Image (cartoon, grey):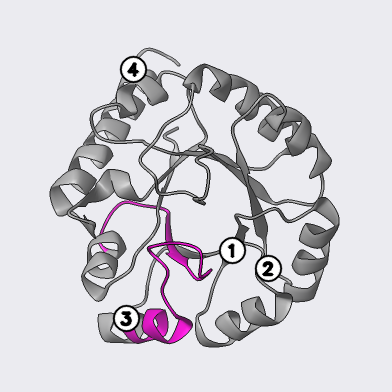
Amino acid sequence: MRPLLKFCGNHSYEDLKLTASSKADFIGFIFTEKSRRTVSAAQAAGWLEQLGTVLKKKMVGVFANDSLEQVKLVIKTVPLDIVQLHGSETPRQTAAIKQSLGLPVWKALHHGADTLQQMRRYDGLADGFVIDTKVNGQLGGTGVSFDWTAVPDYMREAKRQRVPCLIAGGVTPDNIDALLNYQPMGIDLASGIERAFHKDSEQIRKIEEKVWMNRDQTTSTGG
């Protein structure tokens, strides 16, 4: 089994063309106003229409402390499959959003000493997790990684809850081998597949090659 791949932070039609034709399982748009990769619902919908083909990937919309009304407005325009909450949403707020939208909700958490305890607070409420690096004043997409020796603990907790858990933060073609050694369920990339702040076909190709090579090696060794 290979890890799930999410290519996030698409902020142009050219970005979408590349990720739509990639091997990613999920592609992400950031709709909260708190990111430099923020796009509007109208922009995302326009790019999807311009694409001219049915998108064969699940779409994830990223929000952070946005109102339920704002999330609903986006969903009216963009056919999201998953809502990702990347702010300080409490378990109660997460449950309310999930119930109101009728969509799977992922909760993003920042790596730290109490992250496992935080995951347990969302048990039965979140449909998945994204573990990212904490950088003051920024939500994600910083290109900064955390100590991946904690990844197995996060995976065990996610498996206990029977939900996926993706690792984000500073994953690039140059260091993804080290992360793959810890057998993450999924990997979430934004800046790691970019050059000059735009999605890059060569970076995407390198990531995909590393992931599929690792899968083949694991299979051949019985892992």
- The correct choice, above or below, for 26 with respect to 166 in the image is below
Query: What number is the disc on residue 103?
Result: 2
| CA–CA distance in space, label 4 to label 1 | 33 Å
Q: Which residues are magenta?
A: 21-47
For the residues bearing labels 1 and 2, Cβ distance under 8 angstroms: yes
Q: Is residue 161 magenta?
A: no
Residue 64 drawn at (x, y percent)? 61, 61
Magenta segment includes 35: yes
Alpha-carbon distance for marks 4 and 2? 37 Å
Who is closer to the viewer here, 7 or 134? 134
Count of numbered circles on the image: 4
Q: Amino acid at mark 2?
A: Leu
For the point 25% across and 62% down, the residue is 21
Q: Residues within 10 Å of mark 2 (few under 14, many from 20)?
A: some
- Is 17 positioned to the left or the right of 96 in the image? left
Q: Earlier in the sequence, mark 1 or mark 2?
A: 1
CA distance for labels 3 and 4: 40 Å
Counting residues from the N terminus, which is met first, the one under dot 2 or under dot 3? 3
**Front one among 124 and 73:** 73
**Type of amino acid at the residue the image marks with label 3:** Trp
Which secondary structure, mark 3? helix
Q: Label 1, label 2: how many angstroms apart (C-alpha)?
A: 6 Å
In this rendering, the answer to whether 62 lies above or below 192 is below
Image position of 200 (left or right of 23): left
* Amino acid type of the residue tagged 4 in the rendering: Ser
18 sits to left or right of 177:
left
Quick one: label 4 or label 2, which is nearer the N terminus? 2
N-terminal label among 4 and 1: 1
Query: Do the residues bearing badges 2 and 3 touch, measured as CB atoms within 8 Å?
Result: no
How far is disc 2 from disc 3 in space, using C-alphas? 22 Å
